[in-house]
């Protein structure tokens, strides 16, 4: 085990060592930790729905009716009516013919990508796409080319150069980028894909429930017609307050995935508890627009306030706020100082983000109060001054 010890020591030296720190309460603004009560600014529970009474009740009812586990894959009688209802609700949300559930968003990405393309095909992928997309690309055995982040002209050029050379082309992008909180330029990407006959997949893990007038996500945020994207991938684990991945798409694509997609076929169906919770969460995002509106207000306001303190923060409308520091050591120091002041906002380092772009990643929830935000700003001010990053 010496080699493992050496590798771990190296990670510690480089401030790249990771460890699991449990919470002793639900992931809401005020959390209990081993070091006492803290304010949580790193949860993807964007709308605060994980503790909402209606969601908890729906979860309990689902367990009572269907039990705690499904006991099989969807194709081997792990399927139940609740999953079908959730797929229908997700298809309606995304304005697609149908939807298909997966065990996690990660499994959705690796499964969908490796099923839609193979070794005779090409994938064109944004350089900052989520790790699960990268792994899906690798698994597919397709040729992969990367375009510069959000550079749709680069994408267009790659499509132009390659479209005659491959059987099929899949263009894949996050809708909202998970470490930067910015949006993919979908109108331009859609046009390029149409021009060169490429399939388009959008991973809207962070946009679903958060963006668009109805909460349906980044495609709606741009007022694009939902048919212009073939594969609307999402996760139930963020705004939808549960766990699991999905793709909303055409009937025929769902049929194909059911028959071919290994991460769907060879894995147990989602348990009733999470399906019941997510189904109720999808219903609530429609009727409780205040959550989405509050989140957007905070996203814009908090960005402006943090910038006023002297930090480098890009513009944006999403609850993911990157505070770019640069050095991993300073970033981790800042995160530690904040923690001492009662704030949990983690540092994000390579390999999660490119070298030299280490950052503090603050994420907001609709349930953060004004005084929670004031505490964050005060702690950012004091900590930043203390370690000399502002
Ligand atoms: N895509 C993106 C953009 C993500 O941020 C994440 C989760 N961090 C995933 C996919 C994976 O989703 P899940 O957590 O449901 O596996």
Image: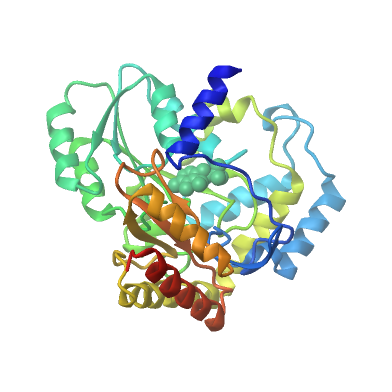
User: Where in the figure is residue 127, as x and y percent of width and height?
Assistant: 29, 40
Q: Is residue 360 left or right of residue 344?
A: left
Where in the figure is residue 316, as x and y percent of width and height? 33, 66
State whether residue 224 is above or below residue 156. below
Residue at figure coordinates x 44%, y 65% from the top left = 319
174 or 61, nearer to the observer:
174
Vertical relation: 115 (above or below) 288: above
Answer whether residue 323 is visible to the viewer in this image: yes
Which quarter of the rendering shows the C terminus? Answer: bottom left
Q: Nearer the viewer, residue 160 or 369?
A: 369
- Toward the viewer: 178 or 143? 178
Q: Give the farthest residue toward the right.
A: 64
Coordinates of residue 345 in the picture (x, y in percent): 51, 60
Residue at 71%, 57% in the rendered image: 34
Task: Indicate the quadrant where residue 231 lies.
Answer: top left
Tell me the residue at 50%/67% (across/down): 364
> Residue at the spot x=34%, y=21% of the render?
142
The colouring scheme, among rainbow, by chain, secondary structure or one colour, is rainbow
Q: Is residue 183 left or right of residue 150?
A: right
- On the image, the x and y values in percent for residue 5 come to 56, 25
In the image, residue 55 sits, relative to residue 159, either above or below, namely below
44 on left or right of 250: right
Along the horizontal axis of the image, is 365 left or right of 328? right
Q: How many marks?
A: 0
Quarter holding the N terminus is top right
* Residue 109 visible in the picture: no
């Amino acid at each position: 085990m010496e080699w493992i010890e050496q590798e771990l020591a190296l990670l510690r030296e480089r401030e790249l060592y990771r460890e699991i720190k449990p919470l002793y309460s639900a992931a809401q603004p005020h959390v209990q930790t081993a070091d006492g009560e803290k304010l949580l600014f790193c949860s993807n529970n964007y709308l605060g729905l994980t503790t909402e009474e209606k969601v908890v009740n729906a979860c309990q009812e689902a367990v009572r009716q269907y039990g705690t586990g499904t006991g099989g894959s969807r194709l081997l009688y792990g399927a139940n009516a609740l999953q079908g209802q959730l797929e229908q609700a997700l298809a309606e949300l995304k304005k697609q013919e149908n939807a298909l559930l997966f065990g996690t968003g990660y499994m959705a990405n690796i499964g969908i990508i490796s099923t839609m393309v193979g070794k005779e095909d090409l994938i064109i992928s944004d350089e900052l796409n989520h790790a699960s997309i990268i792994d899906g690309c690798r698994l597919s055995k397709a040729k992969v080319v990367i375009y510069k982040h959000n550079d749709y002209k680069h994408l267009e050029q790659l499509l132009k150069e390659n479209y005659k050379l491959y059987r099929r082309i899949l263009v894949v992008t996050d809708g909202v980028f998970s470490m930067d909180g910015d949006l993919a330029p979908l109108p331009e990407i859609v046009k390029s894909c149409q021009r060169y006959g490429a399939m388009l997949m959008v991973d809207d893990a962070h946009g679903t429930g958060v963006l668009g007038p109805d909460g349906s996500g980044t495609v709606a945020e741009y007022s694009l017609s939902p048919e212009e994207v073939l594969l609307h991938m999402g996760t139930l684990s963020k705004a939808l307050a549960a766990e699991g991945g999905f793709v909303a798409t055409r009937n025929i694509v769902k049929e194909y995935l059911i028959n071919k997609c290994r991460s769907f076929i060879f894995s147990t169906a989602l348990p009733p508890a999470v399906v019941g919770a997510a189904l109720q969460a999808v219903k609530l995002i429609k009727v409780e627009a205040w959550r989405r509106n509050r989140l957007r207000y905070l996203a814009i306001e908090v960005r402006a306030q943090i910038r006023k303190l002297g930090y480098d923060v890009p513009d944006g409308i999403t609850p993911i706020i990157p505070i770019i520091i640069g050095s991993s050591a300073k970033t981790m120091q800042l995160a530690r100082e904040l923690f001492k002041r009662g704030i949990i906002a983690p540092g994000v380092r390579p390999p999660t983000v490119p070298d030299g772009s280490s950052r503090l990643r603050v994420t907001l929830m609709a349930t953060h109060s004004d005084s929670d935000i004031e505490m964050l700003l005060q702690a950012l001010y004091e900590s930043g001054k203390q370690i000399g990053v502002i």
